[in-house]
């Protein structure tokens, strides 16, 4: 569903919310590279915090998309610093901070900013590892909510941090990996934030530049701030490789760190995966950006 004809799926034009998109439609492959399912559309959305959403946008979230729950990954301290949160009419807010309240401070936030903004992938993977470690309770809450739904008529969810980029991206990456998506496809989904954040990129960079960590770095500080607001596919690939080494993959992380049972994991998959019937199965998926196919057509 797209309200702005110029905005292409998986993005949805919600007034006041940049980088808002559906994580559904992506192909799932078996061990032979045959597409045997897709992520259901219209069930799970990601994007920025809701502070700037307009009344029209709020109505769309509830009435047009049917979103009934939104997961707020921000810490209490971060929310207070931003001036509070915006209550969405008819949508339940589930507070599941990635960073525990006692762990949040401007100094620690600045350290994470540096990791996000570093060149290469080593530092950002360190930040992503911290997100997964501290944020396991948040991930558990999100997954158990999904598992509690009926596979035939699940409610719609929305996950967000501040810009809908890094923290949201980490947990969406874990979720998509749990469903069986290939790392390259997951990285392509993550990289869509570069497109989604384009309309507000300069404003976000300006805000980031107010942090002394970047302000004291001169011209190089802005380059690093711009990198922090980006979403490089290699960062997600590196994170998934780390998850494989450290926890034997997304399922290992979800079972050992988040504490979900095999039955609960299977329920998550049933809610979010749409099987592809045998006669419609296709060979190995090429890049999402290859015009030879569009996984959002169905």
Image: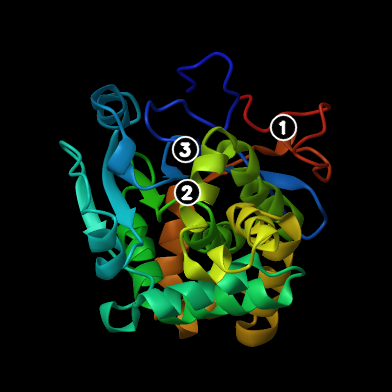
Residue 77 horizontal/vertical position (percent) = 27, 69
**Residue at screen point 54% across, 50% down:** 205
**Of marks 1 and 3, the one in the foreground:** 3
Instruction: Tell me the number on the disc at residue 47.
Output: none
Q: Is residue 37 left or right of residue 78?
A: right
Sooner in the amino-acid sequence: mark 1 or mark 3: 3
Q: Which residue position is annotated with label 1?
A: 280
* Label 1: few (<14), some (14–19) or many (≥20) C-alpha neighbours in 10 Å: few
Q: Which residue position is annotated with label 2?
A: 272
**Residue at screen point 57% across, 37% down:** 196
Q: Which residue position is annotated with label 3?
A: 20
Q: Is residue 278 above or below residue 265?
A: above
**Residue at screen point 35% across, 30% down:** 65
Which colouring convention does the figure follow? Answer: rainbow
Q: Quadrant of residue 146?
A: bottom left
Sooner in the amino-acid sequence: mark 2 or mark 3: 3
Q: Quadrant of residue 90?
A: top left
Rounded to the nearest angstrom, the CA distance separating label 1 from label 2 is 19 Å
* Label 2: few (<14), some (14–19) or many (≥20) C-alpha neighbours in 10 Å: many
| Circle 3 SS class | loop
Q: Quadrant of residue 282?
A: top right
| Circle 1 SS class | helix
Residue 260 seen in the current view: no
| Circle 2 SS class | helix
Quadrant of the rendering where the C terminus is positioned? top right
Residue 221 horizontal/vertical position (percent) = 64, 62
Residue 60 horizontal/vertical position (percent) = 31, 25
């Amino acid at each position: 569903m797209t309200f702005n004809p110029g905005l292409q799926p998986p993005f949805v034009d919600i007034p006041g919310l940049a980088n808002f998109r559906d994580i559904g439609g992506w192909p799932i492959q078996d061990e032979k590279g045959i597409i045997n399912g897709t992520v259901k559309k219209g069930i799970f959305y990601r994007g920025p915090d809701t502070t700037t959403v307009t009344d029209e946008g709020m109505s769309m979230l509830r009435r047009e998309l049917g979103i009934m729950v939104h997961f707020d990954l921000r810490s209490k301290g971060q929310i207070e610093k931003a001036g509070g949160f915006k209550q969405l009419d008819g949508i339940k807010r589930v507070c599941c901070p990635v960073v525990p309240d006692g762990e949040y401070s401007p100094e620690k936030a600045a350290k994470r900013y540096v990791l996000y903004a570093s060149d290469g992938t080593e530092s950002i993977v360190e930040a992503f590892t911290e997100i997964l470690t501290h944020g396991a309770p948040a991930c558990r809450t999100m997954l158990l909510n999904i598992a509690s739904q009926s596979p035939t008529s699940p409610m719609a969810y929305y996950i967000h941090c501040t810009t809908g980029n890094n923290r949201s991206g980490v947990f969406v990456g874990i979720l998509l990996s749990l469903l069986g998506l290939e790392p390259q496809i997951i990285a392509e989904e993550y990289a869509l934030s570069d497109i989604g954040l384009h309309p507000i990129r300069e404003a976000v960079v300006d805000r980031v530049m107010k942090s002394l960590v970047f302000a004291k770095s001169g011209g190089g500080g802005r380059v690093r701030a711009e990198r922090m607001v980006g979403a490089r596919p290699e960062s997600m690939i590196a994170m998934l490789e780390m998850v494989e080494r450290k926890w034997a993959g997304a399922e290992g992380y979800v079972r050992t760190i988040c504490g979900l049972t095999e039955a609960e994991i299977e329920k998550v998959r049933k809610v979010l995966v749409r099987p592809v019937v045998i006669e419609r199965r296709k060979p190995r998926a090429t890049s999402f950006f290859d015009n030879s196919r569009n996984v959002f057509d169905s």
